[in-house]
Image: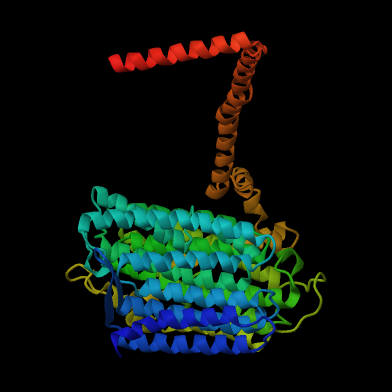
Amino acid sequence: MTPQTLLIPILLPAGLAVVFFLIPSRVKLVREVLAVLGASALLYLGFVFFSVRNLSWKTPWLGRGIDFDLRLYHFSAFILLGLTGFLFLITLYSTVKMRNTPRLREYYGYVFLTAAMANGAVLSNNFVPLIFFWGGGLLTLYGLITIGGQTSHRTAVKSLMLGGFCDFSMILGIGILWAKTGTLTLSEISVKPEGVLAAAFILMMIGAIGKAGAMPFHTWIPDAAVDAPVSVMAFIPAALEKLLGIYLLARIALDFFHLEKNGAMAITLMIIGAATIVLAVFMALIQKDFKRLLSYHAVSQVGYMILGIGTAIPIGIAGGIFHMINHAMYKSGLFLSAGSVEHRTGTTDLRKLGGLSREMPLTAFGFAVCALAISGVWPLNGFVSKEMVFHGALETGYIIFAIAAWAGAVLTFASFLKAGHSVFLGPRSQDVPRVKESQGPVVLPILILAALCILFGVYNKLPLQTFITPILDGHAAPGEHLDFTSHALSVFNPVALISIGCLILALLLHIYGWRRGGKKAHLASEPVHTFPGLKQIYDLAEARIFDIYEQGIRFLRSLSLVLFKGIDRPIDAVYDKGVTAVGRAFTRLFQSAHNGHYANYLAWCLGGLLVLVGVIGWFVGF
């Protein structure tokens, strides 16, 4: 394999995207077949590159250290394999779910162009190409969201603005890092986040966590859950952006900067992670729409990844990275399950659903496995990665972070009990007609992802030793072991027993809320929603008081109003009244001077001539 083959994962999906944009809308089937074949080829390349895992290609580009530099090593090969795998599953799913989309030509074009940008960002070994591909993905996300419908453009703009701010922050951080190190090559940078470099760390961290969807840069995700196609939500926020964002955050913490245990930057990450876990899951718990509930969990679970990396402890970091790939699997599976329900029933409103497990057993099974996995139920993959994060948080000595993670586990399981009960269990809803199971291309990706959740949990040694542990080679302290499998499936230690206790508490909370809500599953969260103090906070959240984008819009409107009335209006008054008044005064003066008498005009001419001569003489004398 030659180094130039590193261009294939970028050029192949980009070329296919161009083809999709050019294929006429009236052409049927060809687009779907080409999409599946193209995604299959990319998945095959993903396996090939992961087997190689050591390849680089570099060519001069813009000078001053700005080279087109690509590098394949274990971490980037692992992420590339994940990206191509999710692209294949989403493409297969879309052949049925997106078949009647009016802008299908654009949909496939944007999906494959997004894949090209993501692959380029992962393979880049120079910050300038990285920024190019990173920012390109933001533009394709905008296009994908707009496909959702008439109300989706506002959400697309919101994603563009929030993502643009985070990307701009990352560029500033890269600029500072370049100025201090003198290089733009990723593999050559390794510094301590001290002084001005601490600012560079914070700015680059904003770029990474913003891409991953952490708070407070998450607010476009719940809106997109309603406005964007469900396949977009399963591919972008649930999988691709988590892989990219956490990949870069791990590179920042492990490679570019030396993150010290309990250092200022590490504690900053842990605070952001813990806050994201708790605040987002509180919002997920009260949602009445299936997709909005999933979207808040897509945000909350990022907190575990950030918290794990922020511990700066091998088991915590490994847990955060493992949770990244686990989350991409079960959250994509959950979104695809919601899409399967929507495909057959036409709604994702929890108040209108119920009893679908008998008519959609495969979708219900896939959802159940993925829901149990995200809740951290033994022996699925979510249990393993969460336990590793819990251990890492406890080893820092700050138990508050472990408590926040456990609180998130309680509310996560409670909200998925509510969602599963509302959609698949209980009495059959009369608000939707009788349905049947979705077609094979819709159900198969859900079942594959559910199977991976089981495999990566029961046989966790496989992903931990094959994918995760090699990432930490060279980052462990002398004598520190990197075998995490002893923690993975043990339920006979205090940490795991606390986790199991959290799940039992969540079950009791759901039963209590279900009974208080008149045995209506969608009302199971009302005791929390209406709890004194929380109710007021929920009301403020639902009024978008904590949405930085909405508050930014309100601030700009207020500022424009102040500028309009305080500056623009006075200037208009000066021009409209002052200048006009002066003009009218001079006009009256000239009118009185021009009275039609020849002698007066002659006198004016002679007077002007004398003034002109005097001025010239003064200048000459001067």
User: Can you say which quadrant of the picture contains the N terminus?
Assistant: bottom left
Decide if residue 595 is in sight here: yes
Q: Camera-side residue: 107 or 581?
A: 581
The residue that appears at 27% across and 76% down in the rendered structure is: 59
Could you tell me residue 115's position as x and y percent? Answer: 47, 76
Residue 399, picture quadrant: bottom left
Q: Is residue 407 left or right of residue 8?
A: right
Q: Position of residue 209 (x, y in %)?
A: 42, 59
Outermost residue toward the left in this view: 478
Q: Is residue 24 left or right of residue 610?
A: right
* In the image, residue 302 above or below residue 614: below
In the depicted view, which residue is nearer to us: 11 or 318? 11
Please identify the quadrant where the C terminus is shown: top left
Q: In the rendered view, would you say 373 is above or below 439?
A: above
Q: Is residue 486 left or right of residue 369?
A: left
Q: Quadrant of residue 171?
A: bottom left
Percent coordinates x, y for residue 123 in the rendering: 35, 75
Q: Position of residue 542 (x, y in %)?
A: 63, 49
